[in-house]
Image (spheres, grey):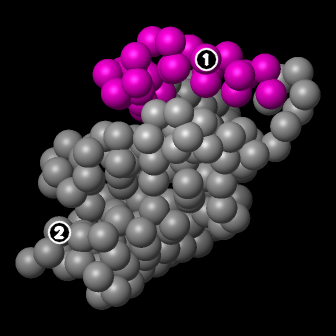
Amino acid sequence: MIYWQLFLAFFIPNIIGYGGGPAIIPLIEAEVVGRHGWMSAQTFAETLALGNALPSPIATKMGGYIGYEVAGWGGALVAVLATVVPSLLLMLGALGLLYRHRESPRVRRMSQWVRPVIAMMMAWLALGFLQAGVADSGWGHTLLIAVAAAFALLRFRVHPALVVLGGLLYGALLLG
């Protein structure tokens, strides 16, 4: 039963999550944290941060890690397959359809409406992470990390993986 639950927890977000990793992550969080309770919001945020620091698509890394945590190697395999196979099949089908109708005004409008929806889903996810950070570490640490990260990213153009690593180190040394 756990394999079926894992399969659906990653299959459904990948079927309805048009837009790649940023669109799928909030949906996976809703399944993993909200629906099944396999992880806390804090653990999910840490998994996401670590996954963002590593190369390759985020949804497959998260599927493999969460699947392994829930049901071992079999769970990892099921979650990764549930993440990759449906997306591949749908992408091939949708690509053919969109390519045939690429000049259609309806297809262009549909593509323009997807971006704001993804932005709102990511904002909702970020708000949840902010609330979890404040609850666990307080406003002082949360604001310090946020300002330092923004400054490093925008002013010095530090690679995001290094910023995540810096946040992890800060948390391990000063909050652990």
What crowding class fits label 1: few (fewer than 14 Cα within 10 Å), some (14-19), or many (20 or more)?
few
Q: Secondary structure at mark 2?
A: helix
Of the image marks 2 and 1, the number of the one nearer the N terminus: 2
Quickly name the residue at label 1: 144
Residue 176 circle label: none
User: Which residue is found at the position 21% from the left and 57% from the top?
Assistant: 38
User: Which residue is found at the position 68% from the left and 40% from the top?
Assistant: 166
* Alpha carbons under labels 2 and 1: distance apart: 39 Å
71 shown above or below 47: below
Give the residues in magenta: 125-152
The residue type indicated by label 2 comes to Gln
126 shown above or below 23: above
User: Which residue is found at the position 51% from the left and 67% from the top?
Assistant: 61
Q: Nearer the viewer, residue 81 or 152?
A: 152
Q: Residue 80 colored magenta?
A: no
Q: Quadrant of residue 57?
A: bottom right
Q: Nearer the viewer, residue 96 or 86?
A: 86
Q: Nearer the viewer, residue 63 or 16?
A: 63
Image coords of residue 86 (percent x, y): 43, 72
155 shown above or below 140: below
The residue type indicated by label 1 comes to Leu
Quickly name the residue at label 2: 5
Image coords of residue 120 (percent x, y): 48, 24
Looking at the image, residue 53 sits to the left or right of residue 50; the answer is right
Image coords of residue 83 (percent x, y): 43, 69
